[in-house]
Amino acid sequence: MTHQGPFMTIDEIANLPYRPCVGIMLINPRGHVFVGQRLDRDSDAWQMPQGGVDPGENTRSAALRELEEETGIPPNLVSIETETTGLIPYDLPVELVPHIWKGRYRGQEQKWFLMRFHGQDSQINLQTAHPEFSAWKWVPPADLVAGIVPFKRAVYERVLAEFASHL
């Protein structure tokens, strides 16, 4: 029973599943992290590439596909260094739930991958078939969390902690 209207109760939201998702922490040779500015937000909403896992797709394939879809970076320009041991969930702010993913999910459960970028900055192309970012930049890991939308900060802190020995 999903409620499709503009308002959902806390109980309706609590009963929703999480959307299966992957996240990518892409680092350049200097150890800085790729972040993109979302096209669909008014404020300064920066984030690392992420996206849903298609039915029948494994998380590793999904991560490589999402990276290319969002940044134009093909799999041959990256190497996967490690991944989170488990899934990291986050809940959307209650007021966003009815408007994102047609109100079917309360948030996302994400498998994160640390990837090293072996290409040149000129090979990054945000003008993909379905653009998600309007701009991008490399940021030092220490500056990553401060620029992220508040409801994702705890996720980013966990990802940084899990990948710390590789950064």
Image: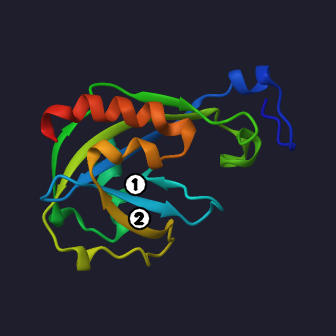
Q: Which quadrant of the structure image shows residue 75? A: bottom left
- Give me the disc on residue 70: 2
Q: Secondary structure at mark 1?
A: loop
What residue is rendered at 46% in x and 30% in y?
Answer: 154
The image shows residue 163 at horizontal and vertical percentages of: 22, 34
Q: Which quadrant of the structure image shows residue 81? A: top left
Where the N terminus falls, by quadrant?
Answer: top right
Above-or-below relation of 158 to 53: above
What residue is rendered at 41% in x and 41% in y?
Answer: 145
> Which residue lies under the disc numbered 1?
49
Q: Secondary structure at mark 2?
A: helix
* Left or right: 116 as drawn, with respect to 33: left
The image shows residue 45 at horizontal and vertical percentages of: 54, 55
Q: Is residue 54 visible?
A: no
Task: Tell me how many marks there are.
Answer: 2
Amino acid type of the residue tagged 1 in the rendering? Pro
Q: Nearer the viewer, residue 149 or 125?
A: 149
Closer to the chain start, of discs 1 and 2, is 1
Q: Are marks 1 and 2 in contact (CB under 8 Å)?
A: yes
Question: How many residues crowd around disc 1 within 10 Å: few (fewer than 14), some, or many (20 or more)?
Answer: many
Above-or-below relation of 92 to 49: above
What residue is rendered at 33% in x and 42% in y?
Answer: 59
Q: CA distance from mark 1 to mark 2?
A: 7 Å
What residue is rendered at 78% in x and 34% in y?
Answer: 2
Amino acid type of the residue tagged 2 in the rendering? Glu
